[in-house]
Image: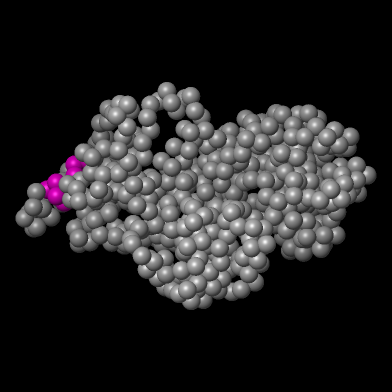
Amino acid sequence: MTSSSLAEARELLRSNFGFADFLPGQAEVVEAVLAGRDAIAIMPTGSGKSLLYQLPAAAPGPGLVLVCSPLIALMRDQLRTLADKGLSAVALHSMQADEEAAASIDAVASGRAKLLYAAPERLAQEGTQHLLRSIRIKLFAVDEAHCVSHWGHEFRPDYRALGEIARKLGAPPMLAVTATASPRTRDDIASTLFSRPPEIFQRSFARPNLSLDFARKRAGLRQITDFPRKGCEKESGIIYCNSRNKTDALARELSRLGFDALPYHAGLDAHTRSESQDAFFTRKSAVMVATIAFGMGVDKPDVRFILHADLPTSVEGYYQEIGRAGRDGAPARALTLFSPADLALRWRTPEEAQENEAAAGDYFRRHAMARLAATPGCRFMRLLAEFGEESGPCGKCDHCRGGPLAWPRRLSSLALGWRSALTSGVATRGDIPEVEQDIPQVVPVPAEAPIERREEPPLTVDEARLLRALEAERLAIAKRRGVAPRAVASEQALRAIARERPKSAGDPLLHEIADAAALLRVIDQAR
């Protein structure tokens, strides 16, 4: 594509979509798509992914842009938006009346429709494929492309067939878009969907306006009610729960306490869900209490906080959910509550992992989320590392603001003691520091599941120096308190810190020694 045609695309952006220019990262993908090249676009929530396939649909020339989307509500919302812009777009999905589906089919067959949204199960039907083989498809876009992967957080079996469907339709140029994809998920998308090697465009996952906090769950509602009241009072937010019953109960309790709380989950009837969603978008201080059924496609710019009442089941899901806060660029906050049981994951045997890919994917997703909850360093550094991105300390998360002082009493030692156990996926009672022995044992390993410990590699020279500095600091604290050194922190905890402390600017080792020693002092003070 020439610079003049990119200029034409910018003019189309202004005239049809009302934007002065592309957002960062959009122009490069649009250029590739308009030139007919295959592409994967991994861009954070709010970066304008839908424009990547909507603009090509509005561009002059014959052909249809086909968009596979798993979200009927998002299809309907985008159809309304595109109608206002004068772009002929239709949809095919299971919730349509026969008359609406027939009208969509006629618009596609006659060439009037420039863009077709279709659910993956509808694309799997032979009738739909026969219709699409009769016309020219200038772009096949797969929205929420992480759904194709067992390693993604919202795997959908119907998505695995989309690559074969594309080949049946003549292998048109393809675009896969998602807000969250780890390197493993990204590779799975490329190998499953594309018949040609795609260009990969990935924006940074950093969110400088967002601060992350994690805390151990406590009884009662005070943790949940205090969070929005501290800096977010009368502001909109989302509280995520892992069950429908908890969602309903929490929404009722918050309403009783004066919050404008609304329930949302798949078990509610369509009318109630629609009412809750409309209220959330129109009322400034509305708080949506929801399962993960509420989220994808949410485009409310002024959400000021996200609270997870339960630990999410994957880092990818967590990132997408916190990404719904602060889309206007103003400061926003995220708090995640978890229990010690959430950190104690078990995997039975390597053979079981090989035999059951879906179960293995679920285990490793939960394992990555436990690592984020237990990290002794910057939250955003750990989060971005899960997506293969390096960064410095964010300066805003609970650890950057004050280290384990931000954690509830006694939990920091627990998490540090489990760090190296988490890296192998096995934690036992012996891995927990003595100071934590009053915490009940969680999730016992089944008797039929033998534990195979991997031999720990030796420390590097720098790690050994850091370990000696930590042992000296631990001994000083122990003498001051009149206790055994292990009561301050276990040997395993010190080795975990020595191995995994984030690198600092300047002289890395000197900074790490100072930071890690300070970490031990903070833990001691937190008691």
Q: Does the rendering let one see residue 5? A: no
Residue most extreme to the right: 110
Give the x, y percent position of residue 157: 62, 35
* Residue at (74% x, 56% y) in the render: 76
**The one of 233 and 416 positioned closer to us in this rendering:** 233
Left or right of 287: which side holds 57? right
- Up the image or down, 100 lies above or below 248; here it is above
Give the x, y percent position of residue 7: 79, 54
* Residue at (77% x, 31% y) in the render: 171
* Residue at (69% x, 55% y) in the render: 73
Label the magenta part by its dominant secondary structure.
helix
Q: Which residues are magenta?
A: 485-492
Left or right of 430: which side holds 299? right
Q: Does the rendering let one see residue 402? A: yes
Where is residue 393, by image quadrant?
A: bottom left
Give the x, y percent position of residue 355: 48, 24
**The one of 315 and 25 positioned closer to us in this rendering:** 315
* Residue at (38% x, 26% y) in the render: 349
